[in-house]
Image: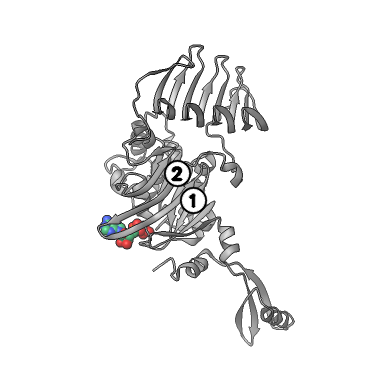
Amino acid sequence: MNEHDNSLANKTIPWVGGKYEGQLSNNVPHGSGRLLLPDGTRYEGEWKEGKPHGRGMLCYASGAEYTGDFASGKRHGYGVYAKPDGVLIRGLWEKGQLVKQLEELPQGKDIKPPFTDRLPDKDRKMFSPAIKVENLSHWYGNLQAVKEISFDVYPGEILGFLGPNGAGKSTTIKVLTGQLALKGGSAQILGRDIGKDDPEIQSQIGVTFEEKNLYLEMTALENLDFFASLFGIRNPGSTEALKRVGLADRAKDRVSNYSKGMRQRLMIARAFINKPKVLFLDEPTDGLDPVTAAAIRKTIREEADRGAAVLLTTHNMFEADELSDRVAFINEGEIVALDTAENLKLKYGKRSVRVRLREGDTVREEKLPLDGEKSSARLSELAASPDLMTIHTEEATLEAIFIRLTGRGLVG
Ligand code: ADP
């Protein structure tokens, strides 16, 4: 049985006398929908058991507006309250009360949802996860490519899927974006079950699809404008988007004249163009030169700072380390560890010391683990040596930890 009654017909909610349009469960608003009350109060957004819950926008009859997080019908989480005079208060709310004012903005200042800062973990988790995956499995014939994986990605967060080729990263993204059928487990994006043709969700997602989704006979600018128009966006800022991926000077070239790397950058710009709340990026910088890759990473970070939940895959440990708020190690279809890179290093990594010593005309390196008495004795000895050149402490790389946990490397 379907949990939601997806009928979009207008429904009168008896106890408030308002008109409701949207999803229902047990005959009360649940999922996504909008309510208009007789006094002009409007709410549009996520619902749970008959109350605003999740993300939404509430326009009061007074002309005030609140856009942000709700819980059990009250402002709860991060949001912006616009007074009728246009002054905006951005803050943290609890049970309807403002508990922390982050800033007050003068009238007319243009700020856009979802107003999230880089949030500490505990604050971020006040939101509902934008991507929720439980026991997801996928098979190609008899081959099980993804094995009961579970994870969440929160708004404003980048989750990096790190693993070697064949680990099941692309398959996971393809299932979550509807390119492959859901075969086992469950997943929700923005609170809605995947596996249904849900245009509302499609417009909230950015995906780097395969190249065939670009129109080769159009220019890059036309591709972006066209794609944005599918979402009803009239001034999408395509020139700016191309600038962010380093294609501004080639904006009016036909895509058929683009190199592979340029097409890849265009697909990334395309994934961002509708300001999606959820981004799926499969190996976004693979094969790009280091300067372009760095520019793309910066753009991805900006998207997360804007509030998007980002799931990206990579087999590059530096990318995972630098870009991800949390990293999932994926190997042979399973998540073997999932935490911040820092915690993974603290938990599984061994720190070491690299010592460089002069030896005649050459330089010799010695590496010592940073634990155990033997090491410290040897270190004192080396530190006193007249041949000592440098001493550096080194933390374990994500790849070293990956090898420790799975017995295999990330490349090859
Ligand atoms: P990754 O993205 O981590 O490189 P994939 O998700 O592409 O891994 O692949 C996971 C496993 O599924 C691999 O063993 C791969 O060979 C297999 N696989 C991927 N696509 C197909 C397909 N279309 N048909 C059969 N097997 C596939």
Give residue 196's quadrant in the image.
top left
Could you tell me how far apart the alpha carbons at marks 1 and 2 are, in whole angstroms? Answer: 10 Å
**Residue at the right extreme, as displayed:** 384
Residue 89: image location, x then y, percent: 63, 27
Residue 131 appears at what percent x and percent y? 45, 44
Q: Residue at x 35, y 62 (%)?
A: 166
Q: What amino acid is labelled 1 in the image?
A: Leu
Residue 254 in the figure: left or right of residue 123: left
Horizontal and vertical percent position of residue 298: 51, 48
Judge whether 124 appears above or below 385 on screen.
above
Q: Residue at x 51, y 28 (%)?
A: 52
Single out the mark in the foreground, 1 or 2: 2
**Looking at the image, residue 56 lies above or below residue 302:** above
**Residue nearer the viewer, 232 or 247:** 232
Quadrant for ligand 1 reads bottom left
Indicate the quadrant containing the N terminus: top left, top right, bottom left or bottom right: top left
Whichever of callouts 1 and 2 sits on the residue coming sooner in the sequence is 2
- In the rendered view, would you say 318 is above or below 53? below
Q: Quadrant of the C terminus?
A: bottom left
Under circle 1, the secondary element is strand
The amino acid sitting under disc 2 is Ile
Q: Residue furthest top?
A: 39
CB of mark 1 within 8 Å of CB of mark 2?
A: yes
Return the residue at label 1.
159
Nearer to us in this view, 78 or 366: 78
Q: Give 88 or 346, whichever is nearer the viewer.
A: 346
Q: Which element is circle 2 on?
A: strand
One can see residue 381 in this view: yes
Q: Which residue is mark 2?
A: 131
Q: Residues within 10 Å of mark 2 (few under 14, many from 20)?
A: many
Q: Residue furthest bottom?
A: 360
Residue at point 41%, 67% (across, down):
411
